[in-house]
Structures are given as structure tokens and as C-alpha cells.
Image (spheres, coloured by chain):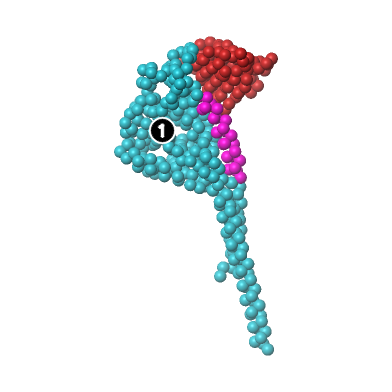
Chain colours: A cyan, B red
């Protein structure tokens, strides 16, 4: 039977862990709120850009130069650039491992295609570094403070590779923020761009619409990457918050059962002592 | 005829303005655009400069740099790469940047990229003028 001191020590250790998980949960909750605000703040631009883009497409529809835009070129997908967006830290439940699993099944589905990786986030980087895969880009520590220019740099690198026909398609695997308790794994094709339908509108243009469109398309890809990074940051905080909440209540459960056990052991030892005293007295009579 | 239209100014990071305005002066790439309500639809690239608009008797200023502008009869959407409201601009930093850009251009040497320096000068100038109006 373990001694009372051992059990007390165990309880104290679990309680310490519980304090840490509780603190991490509260920190994540605060960070989540900030990350959510940033997701919301970035929405108007993306929305307005989408509108403007579809108006422009309506205006430029049918023009040969639009159809031959290099960012719209469909080729058989033999070489794929895969952007994997993971977190930089662990202790977020299945957040990172789900992403890695999703990227593995993405590769399996496209057996025969040659895949080049861009790893955004430390967890994905650490995992794929040990695998025999071709890594063409690594970006660590961006999730702590998502900046538009970082997203833009990642996007323009992908655009460059696509334009140079080094790859035939660019995909992005990331977690999207759905609610505090759930994340949605998404696989998005960034390039070639799928154009939304545009309604023809009679515009005045300072420049040919196709020319403006050509400048707007890369910006569209950049905002997609930026939005994905913001979503992923929010989802990571949410996942960590949920995981730490579960850990905190698990710790409470362990403490409860250990306390019960402690009392039982204490009771047993008292009973044993009483029996010893009583039987000792009885023997002396 | 409506005497206002909705002006939206957004950067990738945030929405700066969404309000009903009477009139706006927008620095397009090939010169300033004056926009009144019921303007014909128009799309243009945004240049670098000072954007201003009026709400009733008040005139407000921003500095913008790069992006796009879409004008519709009842609304104007400005998608700026960078934008700052006049009261958010740090005047001292903007002046310092302007000085630096001027210096760089008045002492030309081969190490500088003239186009880049000119752009920096334009940006700094736009910020200083916009901030000067507050």
C-alpha cells in the first residue's frame, strides 16, 4: 500500500499541472478573441475584392487576353506545390496531427504526381523534415503575429513557381475556424484560379479591364493565403483552449479520485492501529 | 437624386471607413478622380497620394498607396495596399521619411534604386500632406 505521503505528493503534482493547463486555457481564450477580431477585420477587403473581381470579369469576358492569363492556365496536375499550414506549438489536441494526416492522404490521392512542399508552421516542418520529401519553402513563427506582407511573400513565391511552369497546380491545406469547439480541415486550390461568374456591366476604364484584372489576380491569391493564415491562427487558439479545458477537468477528476483513495488509506491505517491497541490490551488481561 | 454615396476604404488588414459621404477626391494612378453621387461605373488602379472626402460640412483626409478603386453610382470601393487616416499618421516619422527620401534623391549615386526612392518620396509626401490637414 502506498504511503500517505506518496499520495499527497501525487495530488500536489496533479494540482500543479492543473494550474498550468488552466492558465494556458485562459491565455488561449484571450488570444482567440484577438485572432477572431483580426479575421473579422480582414473580411471587408476580401469581400470587396471579390465583388470588384467579378464585375471586372464580366467586363473582360470573352477577351482573348483574359483566357490566356498565366494564372488561369489549366495543365494536367503532374507537379503540385502543396502549402501546409500548421501551428508552431503543440498542446492543441489533434490540431496539428489532423493537418499532417490530411496532407498525407492528399498525397496518397494523387499518387504519381510530384509534390513540392512549402511548410508554414513549426509542427509541419518538424514532421516533414524527417521524411523523404522535397521541401522548397519553410516559414516558422508567423502564426504568433500574422502579417499581410508575410502572406503576400508566400503567395508571390507560389505564383512565381506556377507562372514559370515549375508546378501545374498550387494547393493549400489548413484548418479553418468554425467554432470554439470545432475546426474544419480544408484543402483549397489556389492556382490555377477558378474565376467566379461575372455579370457584364458598362464601365468606364482608365486602363483596359484586362490589364487591371491581371494586377488584381495575384492580389486575390495573396488575400486567400492571408485569410487562411488568420483562420488557422484563430483555429489553433480555439483548439488549444478546448484541449486545455479538457485537461483541466481531467486533472480535477484525478484529484478527486486520489483524495478519496487518500482518505481510505488513512482510515485503513487508523483502523489497523485501533485493532492493534485493542488486541494488545486484550492480550494483557 | 441621392446626395450621398457609400464610401468603403479597406486594406487587407482592416476596414478603415464605411460611411455615407457627399463627395470624394481619389488619387487614381493617372490623376485625381473627383467623385460625386451617381457617377458612372468606373474601375481604376489607385495611385499614391492623399484621398479626401466630405461628410456634410466636414472634410476628412487619408493617405493611400497602391491598390484599386471601383466606382458605382451608389458606392465607391477603395482597395488600398496601404492606407492611414490623417489622425493616425505619426507626423514626425512621416517628415523624417520625407527628409530621407529627399536626401537620397538629391545625392544620387549608383547604389540607389531611383524608382524605389521616388516612390518612397511620393508616399512620404502623401502622408505629410494628409496629416497636415487634421
Q: Looking at the image, which residue sits at the far front? A: B1
| B82 vs A215, nearest the viewer | A215
| A251 relative position to A60: left or right | right
Residue A46 lies within the magenta run: yes
Pick the residue in front: A173 or B39.
B39
- Give the x, y percent position of residue A58: 44, 20
Above or below, A55 against A267 in this view is above
Q: Where is residue A124 in the image (x, y as percent from the top left)?
A: 44, 41
Dominant SS type (magenta):
helix
Location of residue B52 with respect to A74 vertically, above or below: above
What percent of the width, then of the height, locates residue B5? 60, 18
Q: Residue at x 46, y 23 (%)?
A: A54
Residue at 49%, 25% in the rendered image: A50
Local secondary structure at mark 1: strand
Q: Is residue A55 visible to the viewer in this orientation of the structure? A: yes
Q: Can residue B25 be seen in this view?
A: no
In which quadrant of the rendered view does residue A221 lie? top left
Query: Which residue: 55% across, 11% down?
Result: B32
Which residue was labeled with disc 1? A189
Q: What number of labels is visible?
A: 1
Q: Residue at x 36, y 25 (%)?
A: A73
* Magenta-colored span: A26-49
Amino acid at each position: 500500500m502506498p504511503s500517505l505521503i506518496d499520495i499527497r505528493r501525487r495530488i500536489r503534482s496533479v494540482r500543479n499541472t492543473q494550474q498550468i493547463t488552466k492558465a494556458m486555457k485562459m491565455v488561449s481564450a484571450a488570444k482567440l478573441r484577438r485572432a477572431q477580431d483580426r479575421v473579422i477585420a480582414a473580411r471587408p477587403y476580401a469581400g470587396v475584392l471579390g465583388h470588384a473581381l467579378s464585375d471586372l470579369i464580366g467586363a473582360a469576358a470573352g477577351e482573348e487576353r483574359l483566357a490566356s492569363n498565366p494564372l488561369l492556365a489549366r495543365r494536367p496536375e503532374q507537379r503540385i506545390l502543396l502549402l501546409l499550414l500548421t501551428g508552431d506549438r503543440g498542446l492543441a489536441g489533434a490540431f496539428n496531427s489532423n493537418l499532417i494526416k490530411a496532407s498525407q492522404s492528399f498525397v496518397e490521392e494523387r499518387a504519381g504526381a510530384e509534390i513540392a512542399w512549402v511548410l508554414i508552421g513549426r509542427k509541419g516542418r518538424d514532421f516533414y523534415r524527417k521524411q523523404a520529401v522535397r521541401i522548397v519553402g519553410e516559414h516558422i513563427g508567423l502564426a504568433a503575429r500574422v502579417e499581410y506582407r508575410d502572406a503576400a511573400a508566400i503567395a508571390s513565391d507560389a505564383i512565381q513557381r506556377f507562372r514559370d511552369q515549375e508546378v501545374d497546380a498550387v494547393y493549400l491545406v489548413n484548418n479553418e475556424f468554425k467554432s470554439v469547439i470545432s475546426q474544419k480541415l480544408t484543402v483549397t486550390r489556389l492556382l490555377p484560379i477558378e474565376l467566379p461568374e461575372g455579370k457584364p456591366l458598362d464601365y468606364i476604364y482608365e486602363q483596359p479591364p484586362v490589364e487591371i484584372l491581371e494586377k488584381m489576380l495575384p492580389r486575390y491569391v495573396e488575400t486567400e493565403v492571408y485569410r487562411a493564415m488568420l483562420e488557422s491562427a484563430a483555429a489553433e487558439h480555439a483548439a488549444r483552449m478546448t484541449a486545455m479545458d479538457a485537461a483541466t477537468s481531467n486533472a480535477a477528476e484525478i484529484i478527486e479520485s486520489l483524495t478519496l483513495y487518500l482518505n481510505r488509506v488513512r482510515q485503513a491505517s487508523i483502523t489497523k492501529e485501533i485493532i492493534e491497541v485493542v488486541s494488545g490490551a486484550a492480550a494483557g488481561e | 437624386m441621392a446626395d450621398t454615396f457609400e464610401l468603403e476604404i479597406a486594406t487587407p488588414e482592416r476596414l478603415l471607413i464605411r460611411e455615407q459621404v457627399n463627395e470624394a477626391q481619389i488619387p487614381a494612378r493617372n490623376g485625381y478622380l473627383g467623385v460625386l453621387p451617381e457617377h458612372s461605373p468606373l474601375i481604376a488602379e489607385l495611385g499614391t497620394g492623399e484621398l479626401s472626402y466630405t461628410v456634410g460640412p466636414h472634410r476628412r483626409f487619408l493617405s493611400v498607396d497602391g491598390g484599386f478603386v471601383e466606382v458605382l453610382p451608389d458606392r465607391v470601393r477603395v482597395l488600398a495596399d496601404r492606407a492611414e487616416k490623417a489622425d493616425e499618421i505619426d507626423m514626425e516619422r512621416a517628415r523624417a521619411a520625407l527628409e530621407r527620401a529627399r536626401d537620397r534623391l538629391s545625392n544620387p549615386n549608383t547604389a540607389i534604386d531611383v524608382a524605389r526612392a521616388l516612390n518612397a518620396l511620393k508616399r512620404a509626401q502623401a502622408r505629410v500632406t494628409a496629416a497636415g490637414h487634421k
